[in-house]
Each structure stands twice: as structure tokens, then as C-alpha cells.
Image (cartoon, grey):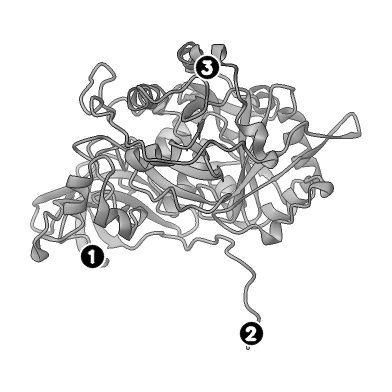
Amino acid sequence: MTRSRLVAAARTARPLFSTARHARPLTSTAGLTSTAVPAPALGPRTAPSSQHQFQCRLYSAEARRNWKDKLAAFSKQDKTPLYDFHVAHGGKMVIFGGHHMPVQYAGLSLAESHHFTRNHASLFDVSHMVQHRFTGPKAAAFLETVTPSSVADMDVNSSKLSTFLWPGTGGIVDDTMITRLGEHEFAVVSNAGTRDKIFKYLTEQTAGLQDPEGTEFWWEVLEGYALIALQGPQSAEILQEVLEPADGLDLAGLYFGNTGFARLRYQVDGEWKTTSEKAMISRGGYTGEDGFEISFKSTNGEADPLARTLLQVAGPERLQLAGLGARDSLRLEAGMCLYGHDIDDTTTPVEGSLSWIIPKERRTKGGFHGAEVINKQLVPKSKGGAGIERRRVGFVVSGAPAREGAEILTKDGEKVGVITSGSPSPTLGKHIAMGYVKEGLHKSGTELDVVVRGKKRAATVSKMPFVPSKYFKGPTPAPA
């Protein structure tokens, strides 16, 4: 995804985002046949705790048996609960991940929206993302099979970034966020652009595990829930103003990577109301700034007035709306991957510079898809391992920005890689990019060239994130 394409989309409102060229064809069953999931001896199922019981609605056995029909219907949705809100507020709509989404809003350029997020706060609609729930005593073991993460030892209400993996190859099916809601409850968010592929993958991987009675294992996709992201240094003070005080959630005590629950207050015709259920409020996001991702029930029409109330309470000096365009430049500055561009089915976490998501115990014991490949890659050839041939790195590029697909060359003209994402950095006033280079050329400061419009441009390998992250990990210690 590039800035020029985003600007073009803002002008024409035509579809611009696609991961189809990177994705494994859905007709292929390669990598989907190995579905064995260990079934360890685990204790009896415990009921969800009351604070997030709303998140995992326990369907009747009959309804559970029809889950495949529900899945097919879900994949056809094309408007988020905030579609009318976007149109009413000047959103320039494009098709992304099968949904009508705002790429930007009238009155703000992409750069202005980007800067506003860094300096104040912006509200993003991310309801196109897929919200999953995995429940039952076998849920943790399943997630530890399809991802390289340690899930069983996660604290309740904590989150971690992970990746779904292909058996055999260890290629990345999708990147995902896992949150533990209870002893046997997990919330998982996956990308909109991989929706159909993920449904196929998880259908195959859960074959034989799905339990209509819900006593051992259940996977479902949430219906009727919105997901919004409030990002920026003023996001906490704004969100605190619309939390129901009686629920006692103090955001000053909610740190990065953790989740809390509270009802949200909103206004309709001057009258204050409260959401019917508690929202799931996770501290984190896709911008590198402090912020929150908020999941809440939207079937009762609360999404629109809640978004309007946030804008009203904050005022235009603290909060603006932002779309896909600013989200892309923000995530690039933060060094975050865009699936289908910076990582895909052919990329392992090690190649994608995501080794940090694989904890020590999983490197030793394995047991996850592709472990036999990935754990060998983690050991350099110089130490007897397989190592890797390529690695994702960041670049600062001189002259014109390097776009996706641009060739990376040594100073002698040898092709050694390709750019996967690139754009001007509004914060730095430089051109930045990500791409893959041959192992050994990945060290910060390495001087290379990229080919931009037929001309060589100097490119220096740079550490990521390009802009320091500002996650809230606790109060700043007082000076000594």
C-alpha cells in the first residue's frame, strides 16, 4: 500500500486495497490437511466470568450445529455499523477487506490526519476486522498449535501479537491479536483482507474439535459487534469521559497490552444513555501511539451515537476522524507489518523479523505448525542452524519515495531484495520503506540502492520503529 494509491483512492473512491496477489489460492488444500490438535487432559469447563460473559454468547446446540451457515453469511457483510456515520461526516469511501471503509475525511489531508493523531487523538473504525472467540478447555492447546505463542500461561485480560501458521512450511496465514478473557476463553482478531482464507483455514484446523454442546471446544465469529480504535496521546482522557463511572474502570491503571471492561455513555437528543453491555477495552493499537481498541455490541444502534458523542465530548481541538490512509502511514512509521504486503503465506516469522513473538519455551518444545522449520531458522548457520536467506528491514530512502515492488540493489548493482511498503513519513519529513534483503545486509546503516521510476536512489537500512513508540506502560517515574 502506498501513499500515491491512497491519494488516488481519495479522489476516485475506487477499490485500491487487495491481498489477492499474495494470498495462497483458496482452492488449494496445501497446508490444510494437517489438523491434528493435541487434546491434553484438562479440567472441566468453567463458565465465563460475568464481566465479559457478553462476549461469548452460548448458543443452543441446534444453533451451534448451523455455525457453517452463519460463517458463510458473515463473509458477505460489506458495511460496518458506522457506514452511515462515515458518509455523514464526509468520509471518502473505498472497498477494503470486503467493506466500505473511509480512506480519509473531507477537510483533512492524509498528512494533517497523521499529524493530528500523533499530537492529539483520532478515531478509526476498524469494524471490518474479524473478531473471533475460542472457548473451552481445549482452546489454549488449539491456539498453541496454530500459533507459535505461549497461550496457556497468559494472564487473564492480557493480550499478545501472534501469527496463524501453515503446517509444514511455517508460513504466515495471518497476523493476529490474542486476548485471554478467562480460564478457557480467548478473543482473537484477524485481518479483513484475509477473511475468506482465515475462515477456510480455521474450519479445516478445527475439524473434529467443534463441539455443538460447547463443553470442550468452540470457535465462533462474533456477529453484531463494532470495533473502533481511539489513538493518540489524548485518547485516554477522552475515553475516560465516556466510561460509565459505576463500572470503576480507571484508565490510569490499564497498561499497554491489557484489557478492561466498562459500559460506555453516549447522548441522544441531549439525553445521556449507557450501552446495554460492557465494552471490551484493550490498550494498544496500530499506530505506535498510546490508544485503545474498543469492541462493543452494535445491533441496538449504539455505534453511531457513541462515535458522535466522542467527537462532541472531546471537541475538534482534541479529536478528529481518521481513515485507512493515515492508519497506513502511522503503522509504517511504527514499523508494523501490513499482511499481504510485508508478510504473507511465503514468509515465516523469522524472515519477517517477528522472532520476538516466539517465547523461549516454544523454541525448545515446539508443538506448533511449522516448528520444525521455524526453530531451525532461529539458529544462524554459523551456529549449526538453518538460518534464513532474507529478512524484513526498514529503510530511509533519498529522493523520491520507494514504492511496493521496487528492486533493492547493492552499490555494485546486484539485486538483493524488494520493497514491500513505502511512503513519505509525515513525522520525519523523510521517505521510509520496508522490504526484504539478503541475510547479512540487514544491519542498520548498510548502504544500498532502490530503483524508483528507473533511477537508483540511495537507501540506508534503518532500525524500526522509525518513530519511537509511546505505549502507556505505567506512570513515568518522578525525577530523582
User: Which residue appears at 74% of the width and 52% of the height?
Assistant: 249
Name the amino acid, label 1.
Lys
- The mark found on residue 407 in the picture is none
- The mark found on residue 443 in the picture is 1
Where does the image place residue 280, in percent across and percent down from the top left?
64, 41
Q: CA distance from mark 1 to mark 3?
A: 51 Å
Q: Give the side of residue 203 with respect to residue 405, left or right.
A: right
Q: How busy is the neighbourhood of tag 3: few (under 14 within 10 Å), some, or many (20 plus)? A: many
Q: Quadrant of the C terminus?
A: bottom right
User: Which residue appears at 22% of the width and 52% of the height?
Assistant: 391
Question: Which label lies toward us, 2 or 3?
Answer: 3
Q: Secondary structure at mark 3?
A: helix
Q: CA distance from mark 1 to mark 2?
A: 35 Å
Whichever of callouts 1 and 3 sits on the residue coming sooner in the sequence is 3
Q: Give the side of residue 276 with respect to residue 362, left or right.
A: right
- The mark found on residue 479 in the picture is 2
Which residue is label 3 attached to?
A: 64
Tell me if residue 398 can be seen: no
Which of these two is toward me, 332 or 391?
391
Q: Secondary structure at mark 1?
A: loop
Question: Which label lies toward us, 1 or 3?
Answer: 3
Whichever of callouts 1 and 2 sits on the residue coming sooner in the sequence is 1
Where does the image place residue 459, in percent across and percent down from the top left?
26, 57
